[in-house]
Amino acid sequence: MKATTTPPAIALKSLTKRYGIGDVEHTVIDSIDLVIEKGEFIAIMGPSGCGKTTLLNILGLLDRADDGEYLLDGTSVDTLSSAKRAHIRSDQVGFVFQNFNLVPRLNVIDNVALPLTYKGMRRTKRLKLASKMLATFHLSEREYYMPWQLSGGQTQRVAIARALVNTPSIVLADEPTGNLDSRSSHVIMEELADLHAQGNTIIMVTHNPDLTSYASRVIRMLDGRIDSDTHLRPLKSAAAPKRRLDSNAPEKKAPKKSAKRKASARAKKGGKK
């Protein structure tokens, strides 16, 4: 019996993206070949304009390549309809943006529950799931705050909670600490590292070389191509299955006292009277 092989999370073959027409045509992504295995934490670096964010948008199905092939979990996404791509985005991909992109007129819990709205989930259930996710980021007391009432670190944690409420297998982060101070940046990176430890695939675009210490692999881009691809540590052969951040293991019950121990305790109690 042949052993089944698990497809990589993402496989790109000669992926190309161009903008403009004729003399003003510009190739942003230039025939990239890339394989990302499930459970990797990848940091993508490079100068401004090298194609990092464009690549992230294509991976997240927010944009389409002009040439080449993109396989997501072994399935080609090139010919999918807009509705099908939206469905995959909702179920499999979580986005963390540099500018947070919270809806200013919605409070915190409604912002986090927003992705569940697109799945047709009833309001009571989606608010319950959003509340559980916020609790994992220690934001329960901020559920009914408005975005303008939050600090930068709190706002980014809300954005991450929103990205994870659908339990995606892939998290795409575009400069997740770009607008934060060093302390808040550390908190956010620890949250992403925790997600990675639980089996999620993390793909992060950053300009900060210090953040690469959290990654298992660093890809440097230049002029729309991969200039270098460095594995900082090997991928575990059997990565832990992706699970919800709020799925805490059931508490272990204390062992029951034996009949002999109970009798001894009663005798001691009676002797003290």
Image (tube, helix red, strand yellow):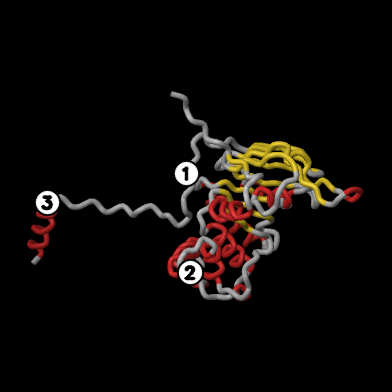
For image coordinates 51% across by 45% down, the residue present is 199
Residue at 47%, 64% in the rendered image: 121
Q: Earlier in the sequence, mark 3 or mark 2?
A: 2
Mark 2 touching mark 1, by CB under 8 A? no
Residue identified by numbered label 2:
140
What mark, if any, has residue 176 been given in the picture? Answer: none
> Disc 3 vs disc 1: which is toward the camera?
1
Mark 3, secondary structure of its residue: helix
Locate the N terminus by quadrant.
Answer: top left
Up the image or down, 225 lies above or below 139; here it is above
Q: Position of residue 143 (x, y in %)?
A: 51, 72
Residue 160 placed where, x, y %? 58, 60
In the displayed structure, does residue 218 sit left or right of residue 223?
left
Q: State the mark number for residue 259.
A: 3
Cα gap from disc 3 to disc 1, whole angstroms: 41 Å
Where is residue 158? Give x, y as percent: 57, 65
The amino acid at mark 3 is Ala
Amino acid type of the residue tagged 1 in the rendering: Pro
- Report x, y in % for residue 163: 57, 58
SS for dot 1: loop
Name the kind of residue labelled 2 in the image: Ser
SS category of the residue bearing label 2: helix
Which residue sits at x=49%, y=36%? Answer: 238
Between residue 178 and residue 162, name the one nearer to us. Answer: 162
What's the distance in space between the residues labelled 2 and 1, CA to CA? 27 Å
> Residue 241 got which mark?
1
Contact, CB < 8 Å: mark 3 with mark 1?
no
Q: Residue at x 56, y 56 (%)?
A: 90
